[in-house]
Amino acid sequence: MHINVSHILASELGEQASFDITGENPEIPDLELTQPITGIATAVRLEGGLQLEGQVHLVFGLECQRCLDPYQHKADLEIGGFFSIKPAEDEWPISARGEINLTPLVREEALINIPIQQLCAKDCQGLCGECGNKLEDGHKHQLQENIHKPRIKKG
């Protein structure tokens, strides 16, 4: 997800430019994108670089913690940061060609927005502890009585 910002870097302080993000499908470590990324970003020329703010929409795959089925998680993320040709520790780099790479910024924001409780549906019932099948409406598991009776050793 590279954006050429050389034209705004050559402009006066305070100038801004907007960039549409459409059909982006970058390799993002730790995330399995299931649809292209879309969004919009605005960069403002400041002393020493650019301040970028934007919104992106991602859809990525997760695994339900109850039933273990894969599902798609939709996330609308606010992204932002300062980009500089000579970045400090808390800044993002601008390449010598005048490009910024949004992938690390999007990855960072996406990872901190992964839900703590990953569920395919709020009412997911999970798996049966006895047979391992998915607990769905009408799931009946016939227990054999002798399996659950405590065994008493004599002697």
Image (cartoon, grey):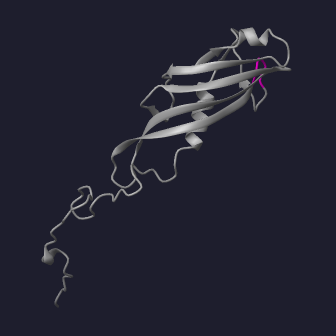
Q: Quadrant of the C terminus?
A: bottom left
Magenta includes 58? no
Quick check: 114 left or right of 67?
right
Q: Residue at x 51, y 33 (%)?
A: 58
Q: Is residue 51 left or right of residue 79?
A: right
Residue 35 occupies quadrant: top left
Q: Where in the figure is residue 6, as x and y percent of width and height?
A: 72, 9
Magenta segment's dominant SS is loop
- Please indicate whether residue 69 sits to the left or right of residue 57 in the image: left
Q: Examine the rendered structure and indicate whether residue 21 appears above or below residue 80.
A: above
Q: Residue at x 26, y 55 (%)?
A: 134
Q: Position of residue 86 (x, y in %)?
A: 79, 19
Q: Nearer the viewer, residue 25 or 39?
A: 39
> Residue, x 84% and y 19% (percent of image)?
14
Work out which quarter of the rendered image holds the N terminus and state it: top right
Give the side of residue 58 with respect to residue 52, left or right. left
Q: Position of residue 89 (x, y in %)?
A: 76, 31
Q: Residue at x 13, y 73 (%)?
A: 144
The image quarter containing residue 153 is: bottom left
Which residue is at the far bottom? 155
Q: Is residue 63 above or below residue 81?
A: below
Q: How many marks?
A: 0
Q: Position of residue 142 (x, y in %)?
A: 15, 69
Q: Specify the segment rendered in magenta.
A: 83-87
Using the image, determine if residue 111 lies above or below residue 98: below
